[in-house]
Amino acid sequence: MKNLLFFLLIYMESVFAKEVIVSLPHSLPPWVIDDSKGLALELVRDTLLQAGHSFMPVFVPLQRLDWALNQTNVDAVAMIENQAIEKVFYSQPIGLYEAVIVTLRSKRITVSSLSSLENLIVISFKGSTEVFPLLASVASKSDNFMEVTDQQGQVSMLFKHRADAIILDRNLFEYWSGQHTDALFRQEPDIIPLSRIIPTSNTNPIFVVFKEQLIRDQFDTALGKMRANGSFERIYAQYLRR
């Protein structure tokens, strides 16, 4: 009787298990790296496995994630910031975007207001003055405020003392600063939330969006278990310097 129950449970699991096709952004470190590893890739994969499903990633450009969700063969999309998409089911957050200002502690720079940035060499992410219009006032008053698309280069310029401050997502700083073994990159940083001087720059949760509520619910349950047993944080620790 026990053997029958055991095999019945295995059968039921196999019936309800599904290969979940998840669309992720192509090459977006630390979230997806070379389409083979990355924080989001491993986190979504391991959570679905914990939920009893298998995982099939499909990679698209970041700008086409909304498009991917409308494809009939896609079950879910990872790395969605907003909750504006209708008739879908949002997971619990798998991460947060947070704009920060990073300086080197050895320079003893105090950033207490927007005007604090005006006399510094500041390298910000591309489009930051559009995302945060108050930064445009700093850029207009300073010849030393620039925007770049290369966040790895941003981090290098800070540690090489070619910039006094950089503005970027906290996750990107923690990832790129941890990719170097050179002692130069072990200098102690001061990380200041941009919200300290621009109150509207709140953190933005990152979600996985599902077409089926049941799979979303199973994903959330598994995600809670991974947070509780420490495996969630272990995946983060592989990629981010904290």
Image (spheres, helix red, strand yellow):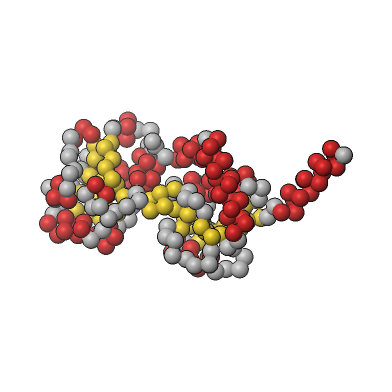
At 54% from the left and 43% from the top, the residue drawn is: 224
Quadrant where the C terminus sits is top left
Q: Residue furthest right?
A: 1
Q: Residue furthest front?
A: 1
Residue 72 visible in the snapshot: yes
Judging depth in this view, the residue of 41 and 12 nearest the camera is: 12
Q: Position of residue 234 (x, y in %)?
A: 50, 36
The picture quadrant where one finds residue 104 is top left
Instruction: Please indicate whether residue 161 sits to the left or right of residue 35 in the image.
Output: left
Q: Position of residue 86 (x, y in %)?
A: 49, 67
Q: Position of residue 49 (x, y in %)?
A: 63, 46
Q: Position of residue 65 (x, y in %)?
A: 48, 63
At 61% from the left and 55% from the top, the residue drawn is: 215
Residue 32 visible in the snapshot: no
Quadrant where the N terminus sits is top right
Judging depth in this view, the residue of 186 and 103 nearest the camera is: 103
